[in-house]
Image: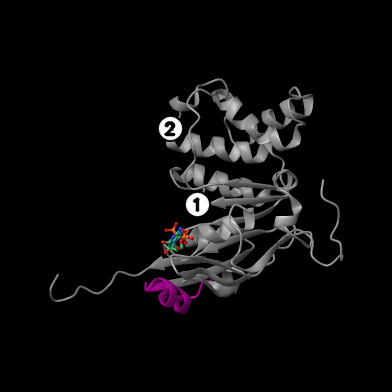
Amino acid sequence: MTGPAADGTAPGLRAGRVGRRAGGRFVVDGVTLAPRPGETVGLLGPNGSGKSTLLKLLAGVLGPSAGVVTLDGRPLAQVGRRAAARRIATVDQHAYTQNELTVREVVALGRIPHRRPWSAVSGDDARAVAAALARTGLTALADRSWHTLSGGERQRAQIARALAQEPRELLLDEPTNHLDIQHQLDLLELIAGLPVTTVVALHDLNLAALYCDRLLVLAGGRAVAEGTPGEVLTPALIERVYGVRAEVTDDGGRPTIRYLRRPPTADR
Ligand SMILES: Nc1ncnc2c1ncn2[C@@H]1O[C@H](COP(=O)(O)OP(=O)(O)OP(=O)(O)O)[C@@H](O)[C@H]1O
């Protein structure tokens, strides 16, 4: 396990004025994100605003072109892949498929960073896999072949793999894609209740308002708003960032957004 911060000031995963160039421009530009331990931060923003790129920078999959990502105060590049993988779990937008594996085997992939090379599966590994399957409601499907799963079940299996990793930081890119409404709510309830620092990219503003402690809104790669859902999700912000008119009612700091139809135009 990684020790405490060398300077004692920056526990956990932080992005400090981080930027990433792609295609000749900054697609993430000067973004700072410092989640408090255990909180759930929602990453919002229109298509192409830089959410996935920021998550990849936080995961160390991409290196920053500017700024720095630190884990307990150390630049991620110095932490090392294996040590980082014991701390940070990711669930990507496009879950990969392992056709020959069972669901249990896919979930057990999450244990790899905790095992010594070529070592056998330990009791801790089996317990972590069983707990992750149970938490995501997949115990009954554990021995099914991965390729027989529906899109939503595959998504839940990826979440289970990340949970089996027993991370302290969890990064999720639109994890509610493919899920029916019950499973969307169950998944976000699960994530919000984990004692894990979570950064989750979401498109659904109402779900973000319901489950996230704080929100960071990106537009054109830059952070344009940050704060609690009640602070961030105002009609003005929604119109400015998404170009959509909305009414917002605040229910004890958990706003509800109702989108307003555009007035019909003459040539429609
Ligand atoms: N390798 C690359 N080369 C050129 N442009 C890139 C590259 N990678 C990402 N981009 C661009 O960077 C921008 C940010 O992409 P990113 O996937 O981070 O956005 P996003 O907010 O996650 O979008 P979405 O909501 O559609 O998933 C996009 O305009 C994308 O086209």
258, above or below 187, in the image = below
Kind of residue at badge 2: Ser
- Residues under labels 1 and 2: Cα distance? 17 Å
Q: Are marks 1 and 2 in contact (CB under 8 Å)?
A: no
Extent of the magenta region:
233-246
186, above or below 29, in the image = above
Q: Residue at 61% x, 52% y: name it.
A: 171
Label 1 residue SS: loop
Q: Residue at 79% x, 63% y: name it.
A: 73
60, above or below 86, in the image = below
Q: Position of residue 261 (x, y in %)?
A: 30, 69
Q: Which quadrant is the N terminus positioned in?
A: top right
Q: Residues within 10 Å of mark 1 (few under 14, many from 20)?
A: many
Q: Residue at 49% x, 64% y: name it.
A: 50
Residue 253 appearing in the image: no
> Is ligand 1 closer than 8 angstroms to the Cβ of mark 1?
yes
Q: Residue at 45% x, 79% y: name it.
A: 236
Q: Residues within 10 Å of mark 2 (few under 14, many from 20)?
A: few
The question of residue 242 being in magenta is answered with yes
Q: How many marks?
A: 2
Q: Residue furthest left?
A: 267
Residue that label 1 marks: 174
Q: Which quadrant is the C terminus positioned in?
A: bottom left
Kind of residue at badge 1: Glu
Query: In the image, ligand 1 is in what quadrant?
Result: bottom left
Q: Is 173 placed left or right of 194 in the picture?
A: left
Q: Position of residue 234 (x, y in %)?
A: 50, 75
Q: Is 71 placed left or right of 52 in the picture?
A: right
Q: Position of residue 96 (x, y in %)?
A: 49, 37
Residue that label 2 marks: 150
